[in-house]
Image: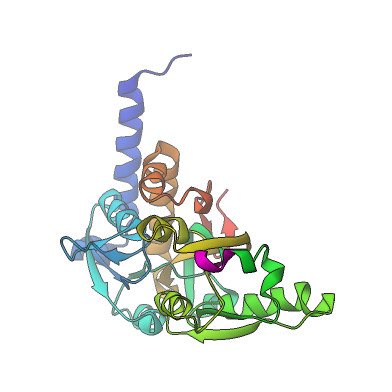
Amino acid sequence: MKIQAWAVAAFLAGLSCAQAQAVPDKFRSAGKIVIGTVANYPPVTFKDPATNTLSGYDIDVGNAIGERLGVKVEWQETSFEQMISAVTTERIDLVLAGMNDLPERRELIDFVDYMQSGVQYFVQQKRADEFKSAADLCGKTVGASRRTNFPKEIESWSQDNCVKAGKPAIKVLGTEGSADARAQLRQGRIDAGAQGNETLPYLMSLEPNTYKLLGEPYAMTYQGIGVSKKNSGLRDAVAAALQAMIADGSYQKIVDKYGVQPSAVKRVAINGKTLD
């Protein structure tokens, strides 16, 4: 049976209205939600160099969710280290900052999982002949942001792929963020870097012939929108809005805009468990 376009539009409009009504009273009365972010993780979050405005995948996702919930989105730049405490003390309502949904973080806040990320090794293109595979990193120094779970994941990978094979372990250097790791790589202070696979294609397009990807992404994990455990109603409204975006294709348009197709999800999850 062919479904008329007007019927689809009416259904989506009704769904959008239902999502707006699902927003807890305090947010509907305020007419806004405050979302914390940090603009240092392109193409996920960054400042547009031409306008100095917040841009990126997370920003577009957050604005689209606010529109569907019928509230204004107010962005607040906050240090990554302060994100969780800002949510738990309700200085902000949500976190959208490429934050990995990790079990230890779930003890403090809830997550609406909206993308996935894996650890990706990369080296300088000019040293490509030295590194044919990820196994060539054994005994070398690899830098990754200490704010993430990447250093622990590298140590685990090194144990399985270097030490157990009788090779020297990778020397892991925790850096002050992914940008610092790339800077140290270009300066020759480390042999390789590691960061989320969703970011590197974009960065490589900005700096052609600078980096070479090594091996495949591993230790895939969800990234989530952080919500206070006191605000389960907001959490569920955000999850419903995001799932509706996946259903109508608007989520995929944002994915395609920023070239993060390998990180896209087909179903929203809450604390790692997909919605039915």
Looking at the image, the residue that sits furthest to the left is: 51
- Which percent across, then down, holds residue 180? 41, 80
Q: Is residue 126 magenta?
A: yes
Would you say 206 lies left or right of 124 here? left
The scheme the figure's colours follow is rainbow
Would you say 251 lies left or right of 188 here? left
Count of residue discs: 0
Would you say 205 lies left or right of 169 here? left
Query: Above or below — where is 80 with respect to 70?
Result: below
Would you say 43 lies left or right of 147 here? left
Residue pictured at 27% horizontal, 63% vertical: 25
Between 248 and 157, the residue placed more toward the observer is 157
Q: Does the magenta stretch include residue 99?
A: no
Between 129 and 74, the residue placed more toward the observer is 129
- Which percent across, then down, holds residue 52? 18, 66
* Magenta extent: 122-128
Residue pictured at 64% horizontal, 80% vertical: 140
- Which percent across, then down, holds residue 76? 24, 73
- Answer with the quarter of the image where residue 11 lies: top left
